[in-house]
């Protein structure tokens, strides 16, 4: 699969997400010698290869996508000597997605697994709204959750051009659906869950407006200043008031990640 990186027709998914490498560098620099990373939606592996290179077999990199794609990419990376990459595939059936795999993982007793989850999959409200709920539980307190393509819409893409109106209304085609997920769930999340851990910078109540503003400024700032793909958003795991003891002291729970 990785032989397609940089070839004609794959231009939009050939550049690695710079945020992903920056977050991994930050995790390693913070003393985390074995980061647990998930990429949800792998494309042709552009970001995966960059992350695998940085990790250099430290920690684990978990890949979620359709089975065939995951199998192909994990094989490519194994051939390059990367031994800590694990694939989690789902079928292409209409209502199947990585959400089923993520949900099963949680039901199997796994929670607070990842230091960083990069969500760049279906880009639909229906799929990625639930992906947020599941990933929020799979993220370690203090971890980073990133949604790619905050402003992306089907209308601005040729993806599913021939049959999209069988699946969506005109409004849903023109609405940036990742933005809808982020605006609905992440904004509210910051307000409703505060960290009570002693010493955490978020121990005092955080005003809804202040938090919202920080999030927006961060999002706009990143896309404008660093020239990365539009409106990528990083978000630290919501501080879970019910589990304050697990907060990491090096990464305050209520901090907005900045680079
Ligand atoms: C934009 S690409 C990901 C690009 C990649 N993250 C990168 O940075 O290079 C989106 C991916 O999501 C996957 N995807 C979309 N819907 C899915 C679903 N229902 N289940 C599993 N994977 C899905 C697609 O197959 C595609 O590989």
Image (tube, helix red, strand yellow):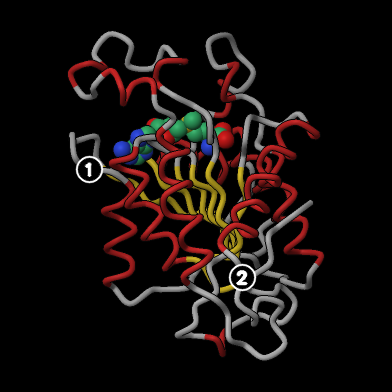
Q: Is residue 214 above or below residue 35?
A: above
**Residue 157, image x, y percentages:** 45, 15
Q: Nearer the viewer, mark 2 or mark 1?
A: 2
Q: Is residue 101 above or below residue 21?
A: below
Among the 4 quarters of the image, the one containing residue 220: top right
Among the 4 quarters of the image, the one containing residue 200: bottom right
Mark 1 CB in 8 Å range of ligand 1?
Answer: yes
Question: In whole angstroms, how far apart are the C-alphas of marks 2 and 1?
Answer: 37 Å
SS type, badge 1? loop
SS type, badge 2? loop
Left-right relation of 253 to 259? left
The residue carrying mark 2 is 206
Mark 2 CB in 8 Å range of ligand 1?
Answer: no
Q: Residue at x 46, y 59 (%)?
A: 188
Question: Mark 1 packing: few (<14 Cα in 10 Å), some, or many (20+)?
Answer: few
Viewer-nearest residue: 121 or 43: 121
Q: Residue at x 68, y 66 (%)?
A: 255
Q: Residue at x 56, y 85 (%)?
A: 246
**Numbered circle sitting on residue 96:** 1
**Numbered circle sitting on residue 214:** none
Question: Mark 2 packing: few (<14 Cα in 10 Å), some, or many (20+)?
Answer: some
């Amino acid at each position: 699969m990785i032989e397609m990186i940089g070839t004609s027709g794959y231009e939009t998914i050939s550049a690695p997400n710079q945020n992903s490498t920056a977050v991994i560098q930050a995790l390693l620099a913070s003393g985390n010698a074995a980061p647990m990373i998930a990429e949800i939606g792998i494309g042709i592996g552009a970001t995966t290869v960059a992350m695998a290179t940085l990790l250099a077999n430290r920690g684990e990199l978990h890949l979620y996508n359709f089975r065939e794609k995951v199998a192909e990419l994990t094989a490519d990376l194994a051939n390059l000597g990367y031994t800590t990459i694990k694939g989690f595939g789902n079928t292409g059936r209409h209502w199947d997605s990585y959400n089923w795999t993520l949900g099963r993982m949680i039901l199997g007793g796994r929670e607070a697994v990842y230091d960083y989850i990069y969500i760049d999959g279906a880009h639909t409200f229906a799929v990625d709204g639930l992906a947020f709920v599941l990933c929020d539980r799979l993220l370690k307190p203090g971890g980073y959750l990133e949604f790619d393509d905050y402003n992306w819409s089907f209308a601005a893409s040729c993806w599913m051009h021939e049959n999209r109106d069988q699946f969506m209304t005109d409004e849903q085609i023109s609405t940036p659906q990742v933005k809808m997920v982020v605006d609905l769930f992440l904004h509210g999340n910051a307000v409703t869950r505060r960290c009570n851990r002693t010493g955490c910078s978020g121990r005092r109540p955080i005003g809804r407006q202040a938090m919202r503003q920080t999030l927006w400024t961060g999002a706009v700032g990143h896309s404008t200043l660093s020239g990365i793909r539009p409106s990528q958003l990083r978000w630290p795991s919501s501080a879970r008031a019910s589990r304050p003891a697990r907060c990491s002291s090096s990464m305050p729970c209520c901090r907005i990640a900045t680079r």
